[in-house]
Structure formats: C-alpha cells, structure tokens
Image (tube, rainbow, N blue to C red):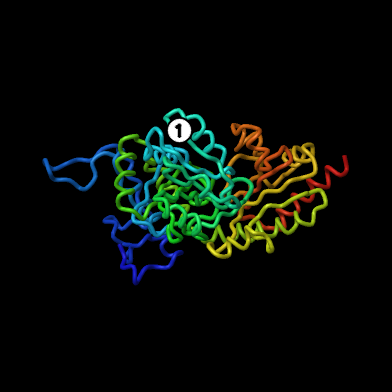
Amino acid sequence: MGDRDTKLHFATRCVYGDQICPGEEPTGAVSFPIYQTATFVHEAVGESTGFSYSRLQNPTRQRLEQVVASLENGIDALAFSSGMAAITALMELFQPGDHLIADSDLYGGSIRLFRNISAKNGITFSYVDCSRENVEDHIGEHTKAIFIETPTNPMMRVTDIRKAAETAKRHGLLLIVDNTFLTPYFQNPLDLGADIVVHSGTKFLGGHNDTLAGFLVTGSPDIAEKLRFLIKTVGSGLAPFDSWLVLRGIKTLPLRMEKAQENAMAVAGYLLQEKQVKRVYYPGIAGTKAYDVCKKQARGFGSMLTFEVESRELALHILKSVRLIRFAESLGGTETLITYPVTQTHADVPEEARLANGITDRVLRLSAGVEDKEDLIADLKQAFAAFEGT
C-alpha cells in the first residue's frame, strides 16, 4: 500500500489502487488477470501462496477489494455477489433482540430484507426520516446501529452524515451508510464518521449494466475481522469474472460520474420547466435543504433524480413512449434508465409506507447515463408532447 502522505489522486487510484508501481503483476498484464480457479495448490503443510480456496479469497477479488477500500479511504473492503448479499451478511453482525434505526426511504430490497428476514431472526427496526426527524428520540436500550442512504432511494432525501455519526457515537452505535448513489467519487462517509459503507457495485462502480456486485467497506480493524469471518462462512463472495468486470468499470468512474451528473442537471432543469411535472427531486437544485447538506459533505450531486407527473396515466405513457431512455429496473450504468418504483424497486414495500414517503403511482425515477444531454431531453419532450396530443 502507498504511503498516506504520498497517496495517489482519486482518478489514478481508480486505475491502479494504491500501487505506486502498477507493474507488480508477474506476467506484466496491463489488465489484472481473471483467476478463474476454485482452489490453489500448496507445496507443503504451512507453505502457501496466500490463497487456498476462492470462497475464502481470490486474487482478482482481492485486487478489486483493495481498489474499493482505497477509494473509500477504508482499511478493508469486501466484495459480495450483489448489494443485497452484502447487506444480508452485514445483518449477521447483530443478534436476536437488537434494534436498528433505518431511514424510512430506503431501496425497497433493503426494506424487504429487514421486514421479512431480519425481523424473522429477531432484529427489530424503527423507520425514521433521518433527514428531518431527531434520530436520538428513537434510540432505545437495545439499539445497535443507524442505517441510512444519502441521497435516499427514490425520494432523494439527504441526511447530514456528520450529525448522524455524532449521534451514533454518543450512544455507542454503528453508523452504516449506503453510498451507492454518490459513490466514493462524490462522497466518503467514513471520512464523515461512518463505521461501515455499503455499495451496490452493480450500479455506478461496475457502471455498464453487465454484472451484479456488492461491497462493505470499513475503517475499523475489529469490524473488518468480523466481516471477513462472515464472508468466508456464508460464501457470498464475488466471483472472479464479475470482480474483473467491476475492476474494469471503476477505471472510468470519474469520467462517467462527471458526464452523468452533467446530464442529470440538464434533465432536472428541463423537468422543472415542464408544465406536466409537479415536482422534481434532485439534490443539485439550489435553494433546497438537500442541496445545502450535500454542499457540506459531498463533492457533487450525482446523476439520480426523481420526478412526479400530473397523473398515473401520464407516468405510464412516458414509460411506454421513451425511445432512447430505457424503461428498466436499475441505475448507475452508461445507459439512461427510467424506473417505476411502485411496481419495480418498491413493489414489496407496504402501500402505507410507500405513500408516506411520497412514492405514488405518479412518481418516476431516472438514472442519467453518459449519452448527449440534448438527446435525453429531446426524448422526454417527445414523450410529454405525445401525451398532450392524445
């Protein structure tokens, strides 16, 4: 690992990690190899290459984990087969009877896991709008952690990470932050006091809509040791080829994040002027609370935005009418995707909870890709215009 005083800049670490001399791979391969093997040979008892069995560790996965740990300024990162596999393993840090505070506006898959699997295992949750409510009011004797996304999925609420970290530390709690939307390029929760960072690596880190992955990153040796035990025990580590795909994707992370953010800002500007749009939720809109908090703790606003149109019929029409933009359930790739949360990402969230968060059948979520912004705006314009003409 490189000396912290001479640490490489972010874009360089996306390509090389912390390796000051990137030619350490013995074959000289520029692209780190895919070690597609299940097991590794030992010369004798007690003599090892450092690898034994790919469920425990694999050179390709290890390389990816080193890069992600470097980007998040952590001491260790663990790569899982999906974002949900990462959160599932994370929940194994807790015991029956433990209580967690979770943001009320989370990705629907996280809520499904908490309500159906974690609850079955004896863990209880309080769902709180952590961007607005006093989290401290919900801390009890058995509370062990606070779990937030910022910005949230899909309503783009922004929580003050430093403030949440101060609250967590006062009460001896873990602060867990899902950093999928902003990525380490725009935001580093560990630097703001978080204990564990979560990523769906399927999204911006992989960046090409071609593989699934998940990450847990920490700056704590004790937490890292516990997570290492869990990943080898539950067997949900990322496969070598998928590790290589995410490694490849991360190399262009700064370029993609800048272009996608530029596109999101342009699309948000258009939507704010579109008379058939009632609300636009994007942290980059000046004058909003989300904007002010983001400016304090992040280096950008990202490329995710949510908007509410006048009617369910218009929302369905847009999903059917867009030509360049793809109607699909994901985000963070090179292609711009539009999603209908009520039937896709949040279909398993109870209706009462969805509506309380503002997730109605008029709400659409958009993940800006890296196309030309004028083409994206033109596609949305033609979809709105076609509805007006019906």
x 35%, y 71%: residue: 6
Is residue 114 at all visible to an observer of this figure?
Answer: yes
Q: Quadrant of the C terminus?
A: top right
Question: Which residue does the numbered mark 1 point to in the structure image?
Answer: 118
Work out whether residue 354 or residue 362 is closer to the camera in this orientation and state it: 354
- Most extreme residue toward the right, as rendered? 389
x 37%, y 60%: residue: 17
Q: Quadrant of the N terminus?
A: bottom left
Q: Is residue 12 above or below residue 280?
A: below
Tell me which amino acid carries mark 1.
Ser
Horizontal side of 334 relative to 248 (left or right) equals right
- Most extreme residue toward the top, as rendered? 120
Name the spot of residue 222 as percent of width and height, x first.
30, 50
Work out whether residue 291 or residue 381 is closer to the camera in this orientation and state it: 291
| Secondary element at tag 1 | helix
Work out whether residue 249 or residue 312 is closer to the camera in this orientation and state it: 312
Work out whether residue 289 or residue 277 is closer to the camera in this orientation and state it: 289
